[in-house]
């Protein structure tokens, strides 16, 4: 998971500095995906051919399988940052989608406040493969203040809201003063909050799938 606006080349709230909206980051992430055999869900604001909006739309991309670079969803709600243009059309493009035998869905940052979209995504998850070998991932690339996820993102015993049950939630937050990034198991329990010393260092946390399936 890579956080919201991962590519813009400056702190999210520094409106006095220009943003990098170049599409080259997509090729760079594809190259890393191939080199290390990993899949990324990345929050990116990228200028794409045929996109009329300026600044560009904020999107969650799934990057995997050598050539796969797929828009999963766009961010619909404004956050007063002027970093992106809020999406006014259908925000969910391919959300969730199947990748390497697992289902992956995404909601970008403040779109968590859009209850209708979150419930619709959860309903789509509920209709998917329930096999024991198939994991469902709910990815949240964000730049979030502390009140998102409340105190729940702060400790190992935290439990997310009931609708997250049976889905692994992964939250990547680019705000070092906001709530901590974390990974839950399929029961909604946070098992990997980011240590304080990692928050300004762009560290990556890994967890085995077997641990994520635990209730």
Image (cartoon, rainbow, N blue to C red):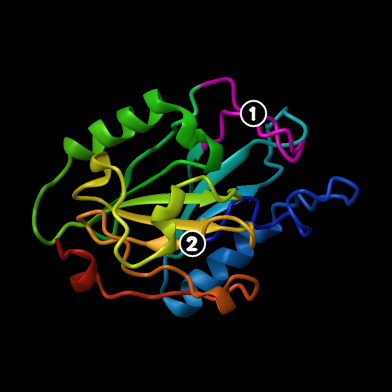
Q: Residue furthest left?
A: 131
From the top left corner, tell me how far across and down residue 108 is, in percent.
Answer: 51, 42
Within the image, what quadrant is residue 154 found in?
bottom left
Q: Which residues are magenta?
A: 74-89
In whole angstroms, how far apart are the C-alphas of marks 1 and 2?
24 Å
> Residue drawn at (24%, 31%), measured in percent from left and top?
123
Q: Residue at x 28, y 36 (%)?
A: 122
Left or right: residue 9 versus residue 27 is right
Q: Which residue is mark 1?
A: 86
- Residue farthest to the right, as pictured: 16
Residue name at image x 64 percent, y 59 percent: 177
Tag 1's secondary structure? loop
Magenta includes 53? Answer: no
Furthest toward the front, the residue is 151
Residue 130 against residue 115 in the figure, above or below: below
Quadrant that contains the C terminus: bottom left
- In the image, 81 versus 62, the foreground residue is 81
Q: Foreground mark, 1 or 2?
A: 2
Q: Residues within 10 Å of mark 1 (few under 14, many from 20)?
A: some
Determine the residue positioned at 32% across, 58% down.
158
Disc 2 crowd rating (10 Å Cα; few below 14, some 14-19, many 20+) is many
Which residue ends up furthest to the top in the rendered image? 89
Relative depth, front residue between 206 and 157: 157
Which is more N-terminal, label 2 or label 1? 1
Q: Position of residue 79 (x, y in %)?
A: 66, 34
Q: Which residue is mark 2?
A: 181
Let me know if residue 61 appears in the view.
Answer: yes
């Amino acid at each position: 998971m890579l956080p919201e606006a991962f590519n813009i080349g400056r702190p999210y709230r520094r409106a006095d500095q220009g943003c990098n909206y170049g599409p080259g980051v997509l090729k760079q992430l594809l190259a890393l995906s191939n080199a290390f055999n990993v899949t990324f869900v990345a929050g990116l604001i990228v200028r794409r051919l045929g996109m009329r909006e300026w600044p560009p739309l904020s999107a969650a991309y799934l990057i995997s399988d050598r050539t796969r670079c797929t828009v999963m969803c766009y961010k619909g709600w404004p956050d007063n940052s002027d970093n992106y243009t809020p999406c006014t059309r259908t925000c969910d493009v391919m959300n969730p989608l199947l990748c390497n035998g697992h289902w992956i869905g995404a909601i970008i940052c403040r779109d968590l406040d859009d209850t209708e979209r979150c419930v619709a995504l959860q309903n789509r998850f509920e209709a998917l493969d329930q096999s024991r070998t198939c994991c469902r991932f709910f990815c949240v690339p964000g730049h979030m203040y502390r009140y998102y996820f409340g105190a729940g993102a702060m400790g190992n015993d935290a439990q997310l809201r009931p609708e997250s049950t049976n889905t692994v939630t992964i939250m990547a937050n680019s705000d070092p003063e906001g709530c901590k990034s974390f990974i839950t198991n399929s029961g909604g329990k946070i098992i990997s909050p980011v240590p304080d010393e990692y928050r300004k260092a762009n560290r990556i946390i890994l967890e085995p799938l077997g641990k994520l399936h635990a209730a």
